[in-house]
Image (tube, rainbow, N blue to C red):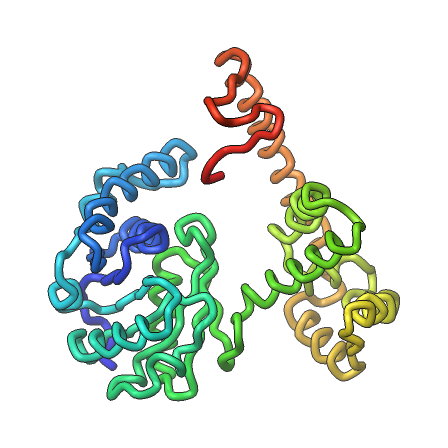
Amino acid sequence: MSEGRSGPVTLVGGGSMGVGWAIVFARAGLDVRVHDASTDVRGAVLPAVEERLAMLTAHGLLDESPQAVMARVSVVDTLADALDGAIHVQESVPERLDLKIALFRAMDEMAPPDAVLASSTSSLPASEFAGGLPGRARCLVAHPANPPHLLPIVEIVPAPFTDAAAAARTRALMARAGQVPVVLKREVNGFIYNRLQGAVLREAYWMLEQGIADVADIDKVMTSGLGLRWSVVGPFETADLNYRGGLAEHAQRMGERYRQMGAERGQPEGWSEALVARATAERRALLPLEDWEARVAWRDERLMAARAAEQADDISRAAGQADAGPYHAPAGHSAASGSQEGA
């Protein structure tokens, strides 16, 4: 695969994910072409991009004018024209295997041979929809969070047949676009993002079923606790910073308790000594214990900044509601229930 060729990024699929990707690449200075099989969807792309750029500007999250970013985004009527000269193709069509198989076959035939073909799929490995293609070595998954222009993580998931250069080029492109790419070492159902999310949801549904708490209170534990902390440090670093001895001390104190929690749900496997040792070694390579206190202070500073921003937003919102006067629910909606279509 050639390096350094200039050209546009092509987005196939113009729904909400495609719109988010358009902003990601265009605000990074890249020309973007968007194609969708639906005429109605194609017509809605530019207004949707414009609306989201205005919101980013209002929050101080855009480095240049919305008009400058919009100028780099074009909507193309045919797939062939959209793919012409592309350096990277990002597919974001509905999660249907038959649709992706047919689309990747067409893209492999039409796209420049050195263009990476990436899917935004949140669950399907590339080996299921690209394994039979002549150009399968340039195919992979680049799974974003939704919306990608606000949540920068991108999981790059090569298939066994994916050329390492394709994964490296995709990682470099995503980093250039301001995203946070991680490259998985092998395909796995749900990738990292949805396996972690699924684990939380399984526990949340179980606690709801068992009558432990209602959905609102379970969500509050996340938004005012775990989620707030996880926005600063991930689960391994959280455990590492919670005990002065780091991850090894955390496993010694809490490992059996977590094993019991898993056993309640039919998952009795605990953390083996070898696994804890491996995780500890990786954490100590990232953070020597002599720097532990400084990192804890850094975490707390980040949390204080997040809380301060949250409180400032609450004050601003309260002031806006006071200026607007009392709230009256639209016809057919209950102010008491707070129901709102599409929320």
**Image vertical order of residue 215 relative to residue 180, above or below:** above
Q: Nearer the viewer, residue 223 or 280?
A: 223
Please indicate, yes or no, whether residue 249 appears anywhere in the rendered image.
no
331 vs 295: above or below: above
306 lies left or right of 321: right
286, above or below 23, in the image: below
Q: Is residue 221 left or right of residue 89?
A: right
Q: Give percent across and percent down for residue 279.
A: 70, 75
User: 285 or 274, which lies in front?
Assistant: 274
Q: Residue at 24% of width from left, 88% of height from top?
A: 134
Q: Position of residue 76 (x, y in %)?
A: 15, 56
- Residue 236 as seen in the image, left or right of residue 40: right
Q: Position of residue 323 (x, y in %)?
A: 50, 12
| Side of 259 relative to 148 (left or right) | right
| Residue at x 13%, y 62% (from the top left corner) | 78
Q: Is residue 275 visible?
A: yes
Residue 301 screen position, x and y as percent: 66, 43
Residue in view at x 47 percent, y 36 percent = 341
Q: Residue furthest front?
A: 332
User: How many numbered discs?
Assistant: 0
State the image quarter where residue 277 is shown: bottom right
Residue occupying the point 28% across, 59% down: 13
In what quadrant of the picture does the N terminus appear?
bottom left
Question: Please, is residue 4 above or below residue 144 in the view?
Answer: below
